[in-house]
Amino acid sequence: MRVDIISIFPEYFAPLDVSLVGKARERGILEIRLHQLRDWTRDVHKTVDDTPYGGGPGMVMKPEIWGEAIDAVIAQAGPAASPRMIVPTPSGRPFTQETAIEFAEEPWLLFTPARYEGIDSRVAAEYGSRLRVDEVSIGDYVLAGGEAAVLVIVEAVGRLLPGVLGNARSVADDSFAPGPMANLLEGPVYTKPPVWRGREVPEILLSGHHGKIARWRRDQALRRTLEKRPELVARLDPAGLDKDDRKI
Ligand code: ADE
């Protein structure tokens, strides 16, 4: 997968050199290109923002600069290919595991994280007529800019790319993953030693009885979801629930 990120803070993305995403880059599974938005400004101050039409607080990012930057990045691949453009904004649709799976299937993503009050709305409209453009929010809170949201999205998408995670099963077991765990939070996990500070690992996990362990894990996931995210329980597919699920 190729990922382009245009930002006034390319240095914000240093964490993408590290850990899982860093390794995926080293192995050529993920190619990330960072671009400084100010490189497309023409004035000495390298201005990227201006006051909002209609008044109000803050500044809005100028459409011409973004337009030139996006055109230049898109042109790098020639006319045959075009990226899916992702605009992080608190007013976008929620970014979920489902969205991550959808993005992980794309060969090329272009992120346009904004600072200030956001990018002039004509930019999303303009590229929406040429590319697939998704305005996405990573949660109901306001960040100082979209850069942190891009880090979140790239990590969630990157770990889904084939060959990135050592154990493909861990993706299937994720909280929110489609399949048996859809809309369920993962239950508690344990490793050695069997007793730590007087606290024992649940006996069932040491039993070697795979069927009972699977049942126990599912019970734990259902209980945890009921307690912490009751609204998710309402979204469970009734056809996917068995008689033991219903007891919980
Ligand atoms: N930019 C500022 N806040 C954001 C959020 N919650 N999600 C995505 N982008 C943002």
Image (cartoon, helix red, strand yellow):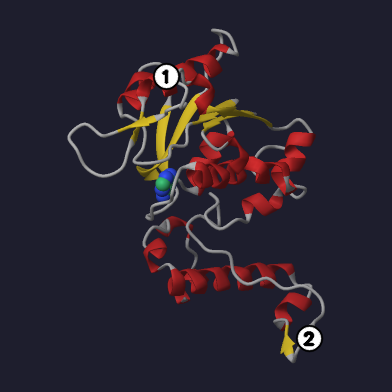
Location of residue 111 in the rendering, given as x and y in whole percent from the top left corner: 51, 32
Q: Residue at x 47, y 32 (%)?
A: 112
The answer to whether 92 appears left or right of 5 in the picture is: left
Location of residue 81 in the rendering, given as x and y in whole percent from the top left corner: 56, 14
User: Looking at the image, can residue 137 be seen?
Assistant: no
Which residue bears the numbered disc 2? Answer: 195
Q: Quadrant of the N terminus?
A: top right
Q: Nearer the viewer, mark 1 or mark 2?
A: 1
Q: Residue at x 44, y 20 (%)?
A: 43
Which residue bears the numbered disc 1? Answer: 67
Q: Amino acid at mark 1?
A: Gly
Mark 1 close to ligand 1, CB under 8 Å: no
User: Looking at the image, can residue 216 be seen?
Assistant: yes
Q: In the structure shown, which secondary structural element does the residue marked by tag 1 occupy?
A: helix
The answer to whether 171 appears left or right of 42 in the picture is: right
Q: Amino acid at mark 2?
A: Val
The answer to whether 160 appears left or right of 196 in the picture is: left
Label 1 to label 2: alpha-carbon separation: 60 Å
Q: In the structure shown, which secondary structural element does the residue marked by tag 2 occupy?
A: strand
Q: Residue at x 47, y 21 (%)?
A: 41
Mark 2 close to ligand 1, CB under 8 Å: no
